[in-house]
Image (tube, coloured by chain):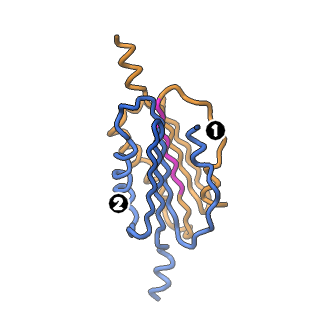
Chain colours: A blue, B orange
């Protein structure tokens, strides 16, 4: 299976809020190597949290470890700053 | 355009070496907001470089800033540790 086949997914319904999506795929030849994706997951989440106020309920993380390919999907709905400001008026 | 349509790409030829791919998409409603993807690009690259020996020649970065959607693709070919070891024998 090609790495890019993983991303051939059906389109989801449009979301009203802003959305950040991280798709990470690691295709390895050496099965003895540790799963880099698991390590990167935590660190990339930390990087995002520095810039975006992330609500745990608005984060969906899907991880799939195969024999030679690991994939990670981080899907974050971000409260729209503009919408929040107009509510405050 | 849906966020996921971006990832409907044709499969590339298989690569001999290990491969790490990061696809990042940001769909924003507020055009006045700064481009989060540009900021995350540098920090995610730094995170990866902590764990993987990244050769500049083996990194391909594609960035696309649209009016409401920005996308970033980081494609890294990683020298296979196993192959390097067998060469040293």
The crowd level at tag 1 (other Cα within 10 Å; few <14, some 14-19, many 20+) is some
Measure how far apart labels 1 and 2 are at the Cα level: 34 Å
Residue A46 x %, y %: 34, 56
Q: Is residue A54 above or below residue A65?
A: below
- Please tell me whether residue B89 belongs to the stretch shown in magenta: no
- In-image side of A17 versus A33 (left or right): right
* Residue at the extreme top of the image, as rendered: B89
> At numbered mark 2, what does the secondary structure look like: helix, strand or loop?
helix
The residue lying toward the viewer, choosing from A68 and B6, is A68
Residue B18 x %, y %: 46, 31
- Please tell me whether residue B19 belongs to the stretch shown in magenta: yes
Quadrant of the image occupied by residue B79: top left
- In-image side of B61 versus A58 (left or right): right
Quadrant of the image occupied by residue B29: bottom right
Q: Is residue A22 above or below residue A84?
A: above
Residue A4 x %, y %: 59, 42
Residue at the image point whose x is 34% and y is 51% from the top: A43
* Residue at the extreme front of the image, as rendered: A67
* Residue at the extreme bottom of the image, as rendered: A89
> At numbered mark 1, what does the secondary structure look like: helix, strand or loop?
loop
Which residue does the numbered mark 2 point to in the structure image? A50
Which residue does the numbered mark 1 point to in the structure image? B11
Residue A69 x %, y %: 48, 39
Q: Indicate the chain on which mark 1 is placed.
A: B
Principal secondary structure, stretch drawn in magenta: strand
Residue at the image point whose x is 60% and y is 58% from the top: B3
The crowd level at tag 2 (other Cα within 10 Å; few <14, some 14-19, many 20+) is few
Which of labels 1 and 2 is toward the front? 1
> What range of the chain is rendered magenta?
B18-25
Residues at discs 1 and 2 both on one chain: no
| Label of residue B88 in the image | none
Residue at the image point whose x is 57% and y is 73% from the top: A16
């Amino acid at each position: 299976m090609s790495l890019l086949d993983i991303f051939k997914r059906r389109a989801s319904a449009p979301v009203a809020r802003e959305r950040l999506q991280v798709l990470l795929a690691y295709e390895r030849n050496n099965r003895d190597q540790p799963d880099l994706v698991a390590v990167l997951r935590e660190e990339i989440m930390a990087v995002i949290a520095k810039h975006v106020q992330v609500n745990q309920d608005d984060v969906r993380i899907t991880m799939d470890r195969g024999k030679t390919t690991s994939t990670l999907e981080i899907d974050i709905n971000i409260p729209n700053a503009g919408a929040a400001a107009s509510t405050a008026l």
